[in-house]
Amino acid sequence: MIKRFTICLLIAVAAWSCKSTKETDPVPEPEKADTVMLTSVTIEAKNNPDLLTADVKATIKDNDITALIPSIKNSKKLVVTFTTKTAGTVVKANDTLLVSGTTKIDFTKPVTYALTTPKGLTRNYNFKVKNFTGIPVFYLTTSAPVNSKDNYVTGTLVINTNGEFEQEKLTIPLQIKGRGNSTWGHPKKPYRLKFNDKTAVLGIGAAKNWVLLANYSDKTLMRTSIAFSLGKKLGVGFTPDSRFIEVVLNGEYIGSYLLTEQVEVHENRVNVPELKKGDVAADKITGGYLLEWDQRLDEEYWFRTSHNIPFTIKSPEDIPDAQFNYISGYVQQTEDAIFADNFADPNEGYAKYIDVNSFVNYYIIQEIMKNQDAKDFSSIFFYKDRGGKLTLGPLWDFDLAIGNVDYSDATQATGWWIKDGPWYSRLFEDAVFRKKVKDRWNQIKGNEIKGIYTDIDSNYKYINLSQQQNFKRWPILNEYVWPNPLILGTYDNEVSQIKSWLTKRITWLDIEINRW
């Protein structure tokens, strides 16, 4: 009995001893999530001598890493130097083990840095590297100098998206020539691109024909972009998409450009039926057509109305007589209805022939911008869908808008402009049309029109580095460029001027429109 008691006591003491030890011994703390992190990321010049002359320190914010390489070279193969918070942390990029300051990685597309600590904790970073100013860069190489608006030169386009857009094809064979009228006379040239195959570019639908606008006389670089943005918000038909880009031509940086869609009949552009020569039957001949009100008459096929309004036929390009007679006749019927005694009749007047809402939206944009050419000169596009009415659009050519002209009243922020044009002056004699404009104005002034200033601020931030490089290449901020009414000296002054001008313009229009 005593022996049995002794054994039980020994077991109890041992159990108490074990419990006491567990309660008093320190317990290792689990590794915290914040130990899985990069504490510094640097792209050192000594490890990347072909791209850098000074070190570039990357920015780490949450799970994103960003770095801007000042070089304009189209290369993102880099050796990155980094440190981690926890010693022994393994860092991989796309399953490649990275050695700080040694491993070279291609950052053409964003790279995922995957971290794993010795205790198995993990964290991923999205690492983006951009070149030059951070916006997309077009590298154009041509077989000969591009010095003609008439003759194409063969070449190749290489696109560096700088991570801004998805881009399936980065190398595109093409032809290139000059373009523009007065703009072709400036030192910084605009260009027309014609791809060998339809290709989507920077998120814009696939096509062959593209335009590079130089915006040389528009020292804000953004007038056309602002107008296009408003056009899309108001639903102006087939308003072109556009993107700010940098352009390098045959190894030489030539400035900040605006890439836009070519105005043409196309499934991803002006999407109306493309007429064939044989489309002359009654069910087909009514569309589609693309026309331009253009005083230059620089197309092969053109006509004038009885009020001497010049129209060129942009599409179809090789138009048979039957189609020519149809569309010129339709436009004349439209004009006749506009100037007829019963022009305001909703069934037999102008509304029978035109898409009235398109005329209203187009008017508001052009009047706000007080676009010099849009009153009665050029770049006034119309399209006619099959079975449809004559419709105003797409928008085009705003470099001489928002007061950027020194030879007409369009320089002033007050006063009517488009309203006094040949067709609009007649339309505004109709109280119903005036009311449509007034109602639409009051519907959009609080958001869409007010949003112009947001667009300006957004563009300013986005292209700030780009404009700096552009005006290093073209130091004209202190120079007169035709037809600038003012020489403001700095980019900030140029941007402030258009905001001030637009504020005065919109205030004046709001008062006058609401007098109707």
Image (cartoon, grey):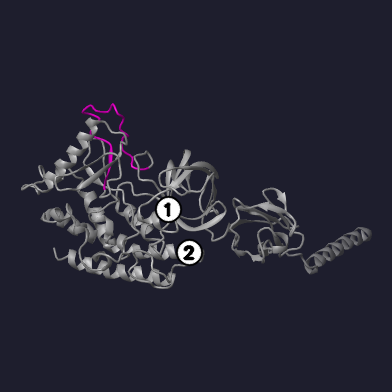
Q: Secondary structure at mark 1?
A: loop
x and y percent of residue 391 in the render? Answer: 24, 45
Quarter that holds the C terminus:
bottom left
Q: Residue at x 23, y 31 (%)?
A: 321
Quarter where residue 7 is shown: bottom right
Placement of 514 over or under 102, stated as above or below: below
Question: How crowded is the residue under tag 1: few (<14 C-alpha within 10 Å), some, or many (20+)?
Answer: many
Q: Looking at the image, tell me whether mark 2 or mark 1 is earlier in sequence order.
A: 1
| Magenta range | 269-293
Instruction: Check residue 148 for magenta coloring.
Output: no
Disc 2: which residue: 474
Q: Which residue type does callout 2 highlight?
A: Trp
Residue 169 seen: no
Marker disc for residue 471 = none
Disc 1: which residue: 190
Is the residue under label 1 in contact with that under label 2 (CB below 8 Å)? no
Q: Which residue type does callout 1 highlight?
A: Pro
Judging depth in this view, the residue of 115 and 268 nearest the camera is 268
Residue 276 seen: yes
